[in-house]
Amino acid sequence: MKVLYFHQHFVTPMGAGATRSYAMAQKLIQRGHSVTMVCGNFQGGTTGLSGEFFKGFRRGLVDGIDVIELELQYSNSDGFMKRGRTFFSFAIRSARIALGESYDIVFATTTPLTAGIPGIFARWLRRKPFVFEVRDLWPELPKAMGVISNPIILWAMGILEWLSYHSANRLIGLSPGIVSGIRARGIEAERIIMVPNGCDLDIFSADVDPWRPDSILPTDFMAVFAGTHGIANGLDAVLDAAVELKIRERSDIKFLLIGNGKLKQTLQARVQRERLNNVVFHEPVIKNKLAGLMLSTDLGMQILANVPAFYYGTSPNKFFDYIAAGLPVLNNYPGWLADMIISTDCGFSIPPDDPVSFADSLEEAAGDKERLNKMGENGLELARREFDREKLSEQFVDWLESTFCNWLIDRKHGKSTEDFK
């Protein structure tokens, strides 16, 4: 198959960010298929291309992937209007590529929801099979967070969501809640598969040098958050716990927050204002360097704002990085990840908005290294058993291959594939 793959935030392992699409593209190539990846560029990420842009894009071969990078810069710190313009521009320019490129099947992954637009064009104007991957439920999540409240925008997003789902021959959801959300829009269960984010076991088991920031001592207990510092992440919960630990005079427990985002400066200002010398900020790091950091980390923090839509409707990369590195995880909201942490004893599950429980769990972890190590071993076993990226990428390719084969069979027998199902 010739796969036309749309992911606005595509990044290789040499950049700071999620590498799911890179891994899936590599598996497609290993199985004998070709991949054209259409993406934008964003702060901290790297597509592997370094040449000059010409007429708004640049193109080249990156580890066997034909990458088309559009000159559309994006940052997690951008405001709502700027993000919206970037998302819409990427969708329109991607739709033009979908109408002009040579390919057999189109695959598009969110976020944002507008990623479905080139797939819609490919399905109805090019008569090509389309697989749509849903990483977050839009407009449900932004509505639940209060980020978008305009009824006209929410209505338009609801229409785009319905059209994207019903245009797709098949869909992929990254969590149980996402799969349920897709089904709630009238999609048959047999057209949906769950392929969660995976664990890069090869990266986190590699022989790399451990390291810590200079401001965190080797004897300190270090809890790490590696991800976006945005509204959805609710990182004030970490600072609230830092306040509680400062009151308890536990200066040996340190928080390391790695990444960028819209609220990073606000969080840094609060740390300075409240003199929280147990909190350290760090710029994003690439996966290989992150693996070295994890070797000297005591615990990974899976933190989100207390929004019920998150409980079963997200599949956060950081959780899978933590367990791949053999780290115990502290999770601060209920849902499918909390259920797994409890059932496998691979960390701590605490109530939302509860800095006392947060601090209690960290003190418990710091005081019982033997139990902490066992939790890390349990997490690594879970990673190998259920979330090995290699196994999940095989499942992903199987899903695309069977979609294309079924489409070919329908064409051969003269069956209509153009009606909404």
Image (cartoon, helix red, strand yellow):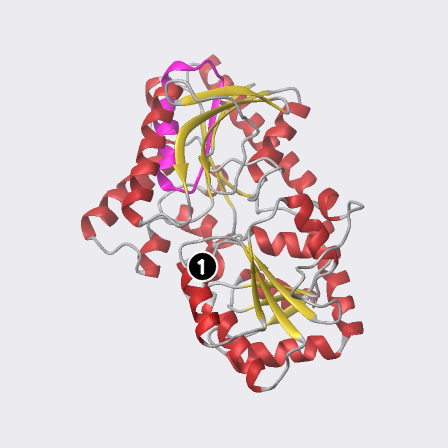
Residue 231 painted magenta:
no
Q: Position of residue 132 (x, y in %)?
A: 45, 35
SS state under label 1: helix
Span highlighted in magenta in the image:
99-123
Residue at the spot of label 1: 264
Does residue 179 lie above or below 218 as drawn? Answer: above
Instruction: Using the image as rendered, state which of residue 356 and residue 189 is in the foreground.
Output: 356
Q: Position of residue 361 (x, y in %)?
A: 63, 77
Q: Quadrant of the C terminus?
A: top left
Instruction: Judge whether 412 appears above or below 333 on screen.
Output: above
Neighbour tally class for label 1: few under 14, some 14-19, many 20 plus, Cα within 10 Å: some
**Which residue: 56% across, 18% down?**
1
Measured along the vertical axis of the image, is residue 354 above or below residue 183? below
State the residue in front, 22 or 57: 57
Residue 110 on the magenta span: yes
The reply, left or right, for residue 197 in relation to residue 387 is: left
Question: In this figure, what is the number of numbered marks?
Answer: 1
Q: Residue at x 46, y 75 (%)?
A: 353
Q: Nearer the viewer, residue 244 or 353?
A: 244
Q: Position of residue 419 (x, y in %)?
A: 33, 26
* Residue 334 picture location, percent across and down: 51, 68
Residue 388 visible in the picture: no
Q: Residue 372's image quarter?
A: bottom right
Is residue 205 in view? Answer: yes
- Residue closest to the far bottom: 248
Question: What amino acid type should be assigned to the residue bearing mark 1?
Answer: Lys
Q: Residue at x 73, y 67 (%)?
A: 375
